[in-house]
Amino acid sequence: MSASNEWTEWHLTPRGWESGSRKTDFVGDSDVPEPPDRVLTFAYSEFMSSAFSKLERNSEKIWESPNSTLVSSLLKKYGKCPQNISVEIRNSSPENLSKPV
């Protein structure tokens, strides 16, 4: 049994990065439907095998639209996948990142 094993799916949409399904310690799983207009999905995870081990972070692409032009355009506009589990960011456009969640 691990000390911590959490993950969040992040979906890139025309509105920015949106958080999706997630698993957090002590809260459990939260199943969120994928946005129908997503163009890219990453799974970001944080794992710690014991209280004495180093936190391992990983980001893995799990789905990509065949429309590579749109994917590239939205990545240029909104940047890389958030490296975040515990904070819910529904829209990661630059003007929204400065607002409290």
Image (cartoon, rainbow, N blue to C red):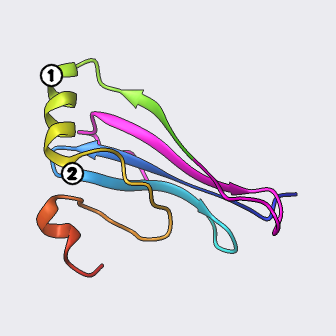
Q: For marks 2 and 1, give the CA distance.
A: 16 Å
- Where disc 1 sits, the SS reads helix
Specify whether 84 is left or right of 22. left
> In the rendering, which numbered label is found on residue 87?
none
Compared with 77, 47 (above or below) is below
x, y percent for residue 36: 28, 40
Specify whether 14 is left or right of 86. left
- Where disc 2 sits, the SS reads strand
x, y percent for residue 77: 13, 44
Compared with 57, 23 (above or below) is below
Specify start and end residues of the magenta stretch as a single range: 30-57
| Quarter of the image where one finds residue 67 | top left
- Dot 2 amino acid type: Gly
Q: Is residue 37 magenta?
A: yes
| The furthest residue to the right | 1
Provide the residue designation for mark 1: 69
Q: Is residue 39 magenta?
A: yes
Front-lying residue, 88 or 34: 88
Specify whether 95 is left or right of 90. left
Compared with 27, 54 (above or below) is above
- Dot 1 amino acid type: Thr
> In the rendering, which numbered label is found on residue 16?
2
Work out whether mark 2 precedes mark 1 in sequence or the reverse, and give the earlier one. 2
Label 2: few (<14), some (14–19) or many (≥20) C-alpha neighbours in 10 Å: many
Dot 2 and dot 1 residues touching (CB under 8 Å): no
Specify whether 31 is left or right of 83. right
x, y percent for residue 93: 17, 58
